[in-house]
Amino acid sequence: MKKASDSTREHSHYKSITHEYRKRLIISGALLVVITFVSLFAGRYPSAGVAHPLTLLSDPMLQQVIIGVRLPRMLLAITGGAALAAAGFVFQMLFANPLVEPGFLGVSQGAAFGAALAITVWGFSPILVQLSATTFGLLALIAAYWLAKQFRFGGWILRLILSGIAIGALYSAGLSIIKLVADPTTSLQDITFWIMGGLWNSTWSTAWSVLPTLWVSLLILLSVRWRVNILSLDERSAHAIGLSVNREKSLLLFIATVATTAIISVAGLVGWVGLIIPHLSRRLLGSDARFSLPGSLILGGGFLLICDTVGRTLLSSEIPLGVLTSLIGALLFIVILSRKQTEVQL
Amino acid sequence: MKPAVSLNHVTYTYPGREHPAVLDLSLDIPEAQTTVLLGPNGAGKSTLMDLLLRWRIPETGTIELFGTPLSLYSKRKLGQTMSLVPQEEGARFSFTVLEYVLFGRSPYIHELAAPTKHDIHIAYDAIKQVGIESIAHRSITTLSGGEHQLVLLARALAQQPRILLLDEPTSSLDPGNTAKVISILRTLSSQGITLFFTTHDPSVAAECAHIVAMIDHSSLLHSGPAHEVLTSSLLSQLYDTHIETFMHLGHLVISRIHS
């Protein structure tokens, strides 16, 4: 009888913690909705600042701006931010390394190289650019993993980061060569846009070219989020618990890479989201991916939306998105690593 | 009695190595008893554990689990039948102890699902079984080595296995925690769970083994009831040093003699 009551008490305790996390998720979601609503009316039309929502009824031009320009761009910012954060989260869990994100392992640089190559060879075709970005992003991931296995010094985290730096540098060098040979009047301009990172070119057509891929990827990652926890264990332990470690890890890394490269193919190099947001989410919602993965999606979406809105409204000329995410991300990174609770062993 | 695990002429060589890590090894692990694999460092104990887990596949020979070839078990079924307490496991993320022990329920949970109330009850029972209720909601990154070892044991028990494999379960523990782990293992054995663990410490084997198997240089040297195998001559031969055994207050005491 005592045994049963102990377990029941334990279940209630567990339930109260999960209830608290659910509450925080709902509040975060509600905040995202509020930020989205404000962003819809923020901009430099009809005047710099936030327009009154009722203006929408009397100003057909504002309707045009919101539906035709801001909405697809904001949808891309939210979904893209969610995808980058989710991919970063999955990378961190699967490599059992809180210091990685797709950019750290050369995936982003590989995707940028792939996009630049496609633009130079085939011209601007969203499908080909996306395909090429995904292929080279995946190649970068495989190469970084393989190289880390070859290194004969240091711990796994250090080796993985160093191999990521090396692969990223190789792709960056490749990108520079492409820029050298690209046509300065056409291709070079498009490539430059990728490197800076931004959503100012977004239309409904660019949004629809990647949104289904992003939504499907996010849905899959969310649906297996509890198992993602177990994949963060030593591979031998995860195997002994009954997981098909290699198959499940490969599949999830593939999906996370596809999501990353899809958003990179339309938004260019947007760094730091995948590194910082999962840290913040774990701090707010604990380490269990059942809560911290959806939390990463919401926070990532909100973060990129805020950066994009600030970037397009603050000055008369647009501040590139990648510049803002790097600035804020790097500052947050310094704060997180300086905190006592952060224990990362290289 | 039918063995829980049966290894028949198993050989395994690591890729790129010339000499096998396990050579033509045959061994029966009886059901509901404690079998201890004893051997010096580098004898092939961990490799044998990997083979039992199907983490590595033997080059030649067969392994059977309750009369069925190991290769015929699905991953899920294998996770429900056998669980592992690793020697150590790095903790990178701050899961709570209960969350960590719940991972052991994975073989019973669908890929797209999460633990249910029933799973939480079983995980908590496992936590109670190893006596760590007081730390159930602490982060695993804040635990001592001894506490962490008990959490790994609780997670393995949450799998409700018929066979429990333990890789050097006491090698990093102080005498107090070692005694605690041995006492838990004895209780588990009395409950009918088949225990198989590796150790390089014959004193640990003396405290809880029914069967002792000695392995050195990749091959099985001796196996049999603990009192027959844990002798001064066999232990001295295994560890290549002078080891004495004697009885004290009804317990077998093993001691290395300084020459």
Image (cartoon, grey):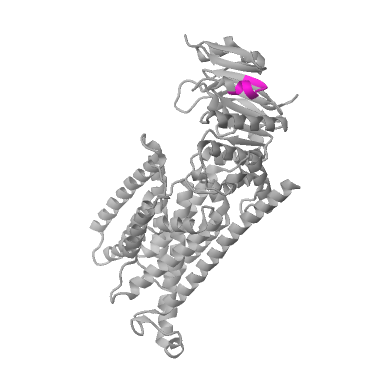
Q: Is residue B108 visible?
A: yes
Vertical comparison of A219 with B220: above or below: below
Q: Is residue B16 left or right of residue B60?
A: left
Q: Quadrant of residue A307?
A: bottom left
Please check the rendered image and state whether residue B251 is part of the magenta-colored stretch, yes or no: no
Q: In the image, residue B247 lies at what x, y percent? A: 64, 14
Q: Quadrant of the N terminus of chain B?
A: top right
Write the residue at 48% across / 55% down. A282
Q: Quadrant of residue A328?
A: bottom left
Q: Is residue B63 left or right of residue A193?
A: right
Write the residue at 53% across / 23% down. B44
Q: Is residue B127 left or right of residue A31?
A: right
Q: Is residue A245 left or right of residue A195?
A: right
Q: In the image, residue A261 lies at what x, y percent? A: 41, 58
Residue extending farthest bottom:
A58
Q: In the image, residue B11 lies at what x, y percent? A: 56, 23
Q: Is residue A122 visible?
A: no
Vertical comparison of B131 with A324: above or below: above
The region drawn magenta spans B204-212
